[in-house]
Image (spheres, rainbow, N blue to C red):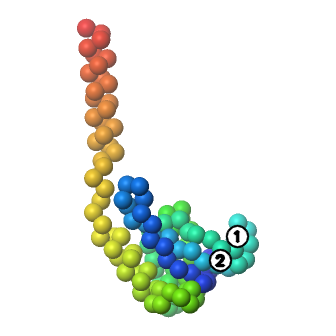
Amino acid sequence: MNMLNNWKTLELITREGERLVCIEGRVYGTNPRFPSSSHIRTSPITGHRFESNSMVVMTKRGSEYLLGKPDPAETFAQQRLMRRLSRLSQQAPSAFNELESQLTGYVEVQKDSTTKES
């Protein structure tokens, strides 16, 4: 598992107004995608857990990162991250229902083709 040091949280807002939390920092580990000490930004954080008093975050892409020392300028970084993640889980689900929208479009297409055959 890769470790992130000198990390800080970023709260991003999509065009649709959805809030996402990502983490930037220096990655250390054995993953060949990231040379040691590379500066990275994770994909959106989807969850977290604690292992031996250290926080591990999970990302939307399925990666896991052990959080090491935060950026010295980020006071109470871990507590702030946990607060942001708890706010995300309390957000109302999107009003857009993709299944309903697809079915509505499908029904309209069927009506049009039935009308043309008559």
Quadrant position of the C terminus in the picture: top left
Query: In the drawing, does residue 12 fall left or right of residue 103?
Result: right
Q: Which residue is depicted at the point 57% across and 74% down?
A: 24
Of residues 17 and 59, the one drawn nearer to the viewer in this rendering: 17
Q: Amino acid at mark 1?
A: Phe
From what the image shows, is residue 116 above or below residue 4? Answer: above
Label 1 sits on a secondary structure element that is loop
- Identified at 42% across, 83% down, the residue is 80
Say what amino acid the circle numbered 2 marks: Val
Query: Which residue is pictured at 53% across the width and 74% down the height?
Result: 23
Q: Report the number of discs.
A: 2
Q: Position of residue 76 (x, y in %)?
A: 45, 90
Relative placement, left or right, of 13 versus 66 is left
Q: Position of residue 50 (x, y in %)?
A: 47, 84
Tag 2 secondary structure: strand
Find disc 1 in the rendering and name its residue: 34
Q: Earlier in the sequence, mark 2 or mark 1?
A: 2
The circle drawn on residue 27 is 2
